[in-house]
Image (tube, rainbow, N blue to C red):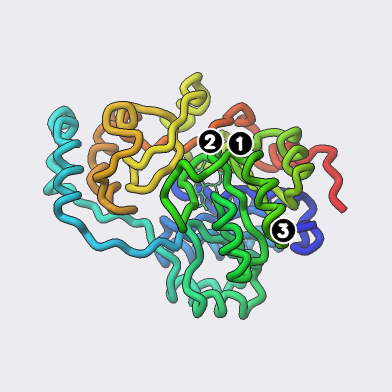
Amino acid sequence: MLTQLWDLKLPLIQAPMAGVQGSALTIAVSNAGGLGSLPCALLSREELVQELETIRNQTDKPFNVNFFCHTLPVEDPLKNQAWQSALSPYYKEYNVDFSTNKIPTKRRSFDEESIEILEHYKPAVVSFHFGLPSSELLVRVRKWGARIISSATTVAEAVYLEEKGVDAIIAQGLEAGGHRGHFLSDDLTQQAGTFALLPQIVQAVNCPIIAAGGIADKQGVLAALNLGASAVQVGTAYLLCPEVKANALHRAAIKSARSKHTAIANVFTGRPARSIVNKLIRELGPLRADMPPFPLASTALVPLRAAAEQRACDDFTPLWCGQNASGCKEISASELTHLLCEGIRVG
Ligand SMILES: Cc1cc2nc3c(=O)[nH]c(=O)nc-3n(C[C@H](O)[C@H](O)[C@H](O)COP(=O)(O)O)c2cc1C
């Protein structure tokens, strides 16, 4: 069991959720006996140091730091142009001049600089999304004894990750909120739901498997453990906790009946990710072939999103959310963690 191996009381990892949470959620879940996660993809160097300091001061329990490891793309002027033309009616509607409003996207990839910071704090677990960084970087992560995990969306990705020597694999089902973690193929038709993917990955590899996607209550946790998972990773269910920084529009959408309609869309960042359906997805998505590569597509949306949000409108806001928002509760992350694992005994 992962709990014994990783010194956890509960077989639960709080999913890292870039853009909507910082150290407060990490600390609350780790102190409650699960594994709290800090998403680092949107943090500057200074913000990362600050968050790690805060965690170190408020918990002595294990925690996870999470990074994206995409290849930094080259700008494609034709794709940028096509995307800006598609958005131009909305620029007009909101009186946005994109040419004077260009704010480069902050999404960063795991690199030497990240390691130099982490070496000082020695987090117990480092997780990756979109595959793995280079073997040279992984060797350095292992030097302070960190466990390494990454997401697989297919059996082939799980086999690849095991061959690379990861300590555990997250089986990310199609229900999951946020970005798909795929890295071998971007063909979404190859991906399956959690309870179809999980047992097939369990059969194919020997390392511990963490089930993710659509798990929102203790019955879901139990079902995943019964299907061979060593732990679960839960994201969406935490989105209404007070420790989460999701903005008022995102929270309102999650609380509303709209959360029952999500879609995997690439129109926010250039990579497929599950969000509650809004105007951008309905009118330009969900999946477009001519998008600028991740994460560059988001640059053209930033000023539009800001202008719409000023009018309390979520038409261009990424409303990341999984297919099962039924477990979202406005209770503390510690309470929710205990509810998710209530009565679950781990050996
Ligand atoms: C708001 C949100 C943001 C996310 N951001 C990240 C991230 O930064 N890194 C990551 O590895 N996964 C991210 N994910 C995906 C989660 O790791 C996980 O696969 C998913 O939350 C599990 O499904 P669930 O949302 O149905 O619980 C995010 C998910 C959500 C809902």
In the displayed structure, 273 sits above or below 39; it is above
Q: Quadrant of residue 46?
A: bottom left
Point out the tag, 3 or 2, that comes first from the N-terminus: 3
Is the CB of the residue bearing disc 1 within 8 angstroms of ligand 1? yes
How far apart marks 3 and 1 lie (CA) works out to 19 Å
In contact (CB < 8 Å): disc 2 and disc 1:
yes
Residue 62 visible (yes or no): yes
- Report whether 263 appears left or right of 309: right
Give the residue drawn at x 53%, y 60%: 128
The residue that disc 3 covers is 208
Label 1: how many Cα within 10 Å (few below 14, some 14–19, many 20+): many
User: Whole-percent x and y of residue 325?
Assistant: 57, 30
Whichever of callouts 3 and 1 sits on the residue coming sooner in the sequence is 3
Q: Which mark is residue 214?
A: 1
Dot 2 surroundings within 10 Å: few (below 14), some, or many (20 or more)?
many
| Mark 3 Cα-neighbour bin, 10 Å: few <14, some 14–19, many ≥20 | many
Q: Give residue 221's quadrant in the image.
A: top right
**In the structure shown, which secondary structural element does the residue marked by tag 1 occupy?**
loop
Q: Which residue is mark 2?
A: 322
What's the amino acid at mark 1?
Gly
Is residue 61 among what the camera can see?
no
